Image (cartoon, rainbow, N blue to C red):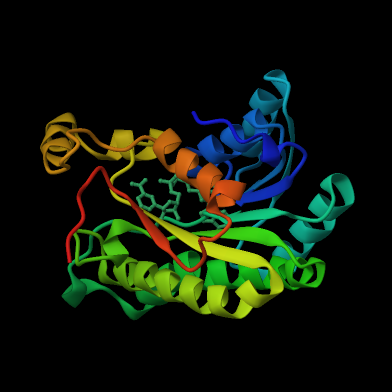
Amino acid sequence: MTRYPELHGRTVVVTGGSRGIGAATAHAFAAEGARVCVVGRDEAALAAVVGAITAEGGTAMSVAADVTDSAALARVAEESGRRLGPVDVLAAFAGGQGRPVPSAELTEERWREVLDADLTSAFLTVRTFLPGMLERGGGSVITMSSAAGRQPSGANLAYGVASAGLVMLTRHLATEAGPRGVRVNCLAPSVILTERSAVQIPAGVREQLARAHPLGRLGLPRDVAACALFLASDGASWLSGITLDVAGGRITG
Ligand SMILES: NC(=O)c1ccc[n+]([C@@H]2O[C@H](COP(=O)([O-])OP(=O)(O)OC[C@H]3O[C@@H](n4cnc5c(N)ncnc54)[C@H](OP(=O)(O)O)[C@@H]3O)[C@@H](O)[C@H]2O)c1
């Protein structure tokens, strides 16, 4: 990975940091010397990530919290602030409710659940940390969309709509926050092989999907983590409001 010495000593909060893309991102920031707070609901998984980062010589802590709950997010801000200091980089990555459902069979309950988990959660997360960043006049927010928000996909409709909403949430916030020194950018990965998706996608389908990406393979969590580091780095200091398609060249529309 490209090195970013300017990230040394920065405080980074990664929601969805207990596994998958978020965990890889937490590791990548910690490897640059950043002080990382990982957030998720599974305490054992959070402890494993913190343990692994610490064993590698990094600085990490965790807070177990449901990011659809603003009171729980306030607790994340309080605990991370007390132990690591004010947040410099917020990676709002928690979510992932894309499992396919034909739209005619998508229930109202499921629709609300997915919007809550993937879009409202990001709004609540940003709303928790952004005021402090604006007050301090600096920082980088990175939101998590998906290729499903860039064009219709096999994911369920609610996930596609939530992912598209995240692109606009990012652009809107970037416009407001830019004049106060805070950059807001978004990542839109295509298929990323995590522990979870590796189990869910059968090997044959995986090969087919890999061929559908011009670069001939599926993404890995570290591909997304590398983009997160770049967006947080000084090299991206004139980038705000963008959505980066982390998609192995599979860009349409
Ligand atoms: N993998 C892909 O192909 C792909 C593609 C495009 C976009 N994405 C997006 O990337 C993000 C991470 O996905 P992933 O594939 O790494 O998923 P994953 O392995 O299933 O991990 C999801 C992470 O989000 C956390 N999370 C989910 N809902 C939460 C909630 N309500 N409160 C707190 N934490 C919550 C989970 O924590 P706990 O398990 O500890 O609760 C876990 O850390 C998601 O937003 C997903 O939509 C993934």
Q: Is residue 122 toward the left or the right of residue 211 in the image?
A: right
Please say if 50 is above or below 36.
Answer: above
Q: Quadrant of the C terminus?
A: bottom left
Residue 125 in sight from this viewpoint: no
Q: Residue at x 22, y 33 (%)?
A: 217
Residue 217 in sight from this viewpoint: yes
Q: Is residue 179 toward the left or the right of residue 211 in the image?
A: right
Between 238 and 24, the residue placed more toward the observer is 238
Q: Residue at x 60, y 80 (%)?
A: 176
Total numbered circles? 0
Q: Residue at x 21, y 55 (%)?
A: 251
Outermost residue toward the right in this view? 82
Please say if 212 is above or below 109.
Answer: above
Q: Position of residue 216 (x, y in %)?
A: 17, 33
Q: Residue at x 75, y 57 (%)?
A: 76
Between 128 and 101, the residue placed more toward the observer is 128
Q: Quadrant of residue 70?
A: bottom right
Q: Position of residue 136 (x, y in %)?
A: 81, 66
Please say if 14 is above or below 106.
Answer: above
Q: Is residue 29 toward the left or the right of residue 240 in the image?
A: right
Q: Position of residue 188 (x, y in %)?
A: 37, 56
